[in-house]
Amino acid sequence: REPQAAAAALTQAIKLDPKAREPREALEAVRARLKAQPQLELVLDDLRLVEERALRALCHSDLSRSRQQLELMLKQARAQAGTLGRDAGHWEGRALLGLALVCVDEGEAAAAADYIAACRRRLPAEDAARQDARLEGALALVSAAVALETEQLVEAEEHVAAGLSLARSTRSDALLLRLLGTSSALLARHGRWGEAEA
């Protein structure tokens, strides 16, 4: 979660239960991080803006502009690794997944697979305290979409199943809906129209 939004949510949690220690400790950690990294909010705003431009260009099939923006986002995430700290890998992963989508639209399936593999390497170790559920969900979604586009239907089913499991465990409705859409497209590819419409 973004630092200012996290601080606001934690402040609200403290107001609801003033005796709870966990929200106070988490709020102190957020404030300490913002104090240690005063540029963090600006860097995050820049990354979000570049990502938004890239995705808008991708939606309009302006692949060269989308690639340009995603490469800029990747460079920014790497250059700002000191400011972003542990979030640098998250933003790098998002840029890599966007580049994978551009590659699929350009018909470069091998390059898309390389970007997905690079994103997978950005995921934190299996330590539960450092997991990046948002990036894992995006990875499952993009991997399923790429596999679907390249007619690797069994692999697409595996990614959808893994993503649905993650969406349910993290209670992410947005991810769940996107994966259900991908699942419907997969069922339609199999010719199971009745199930796809349900």
Image: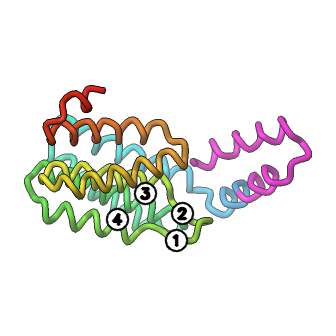
Q: Is residue 142 left or right of residue 188?
A: right
Q: How is the image coloured?
A: rainbow
Look at mark 4 in the image and give the residue it sits on: 119
Q: Amino acid at mark 1?
A: Glu
Q: Residue at x 13, y 48 (%)?
A: 105
- 90 above or below 194? below
- Amino acid type assigned to the residue bearing label 4 in the image: Cys
Which mark sits nearer the N-terminus, 2 or 3?
Answer: 2
Residue 138 image point, x, y percent:
38, 51
**113 shown above or below 173:** below
Q: Is residue 16 magenta?
A: yes
Amino acid tagged 3: Glu
The structure residue drawn at horizontal position 36% and vertical position 67%, both measured from the top left corner, is: 120
* Towards the viewer: 165 or 41: 165
On residue 126, which mark appears? 1
Mark 4 in CB contact with mark 3 (< 8 angstroms) = no
Q: Which residue is mark 2?
A: 131
Residue drawn 19% across the image and 60% down it = 112
**What separation in Å lies between label 4 and label 2 (alpha carbons)?**
14 Å
Q: What's the CA distance linking mark 4 and mark 3?
A: 9 Å
Q: Position of residue 58 (x, y in %)?
A: 21, 41
**Residue topped by disc 3:** 136
Distance from disc 2 to disc 1, alpha carbons, whole Å, reads 7 Å
Q: Residue at x 48, y 36 (%)?
A: 173
Query: Which badge, 2 or 1, comes first in the chain's sequence?
Result: 1
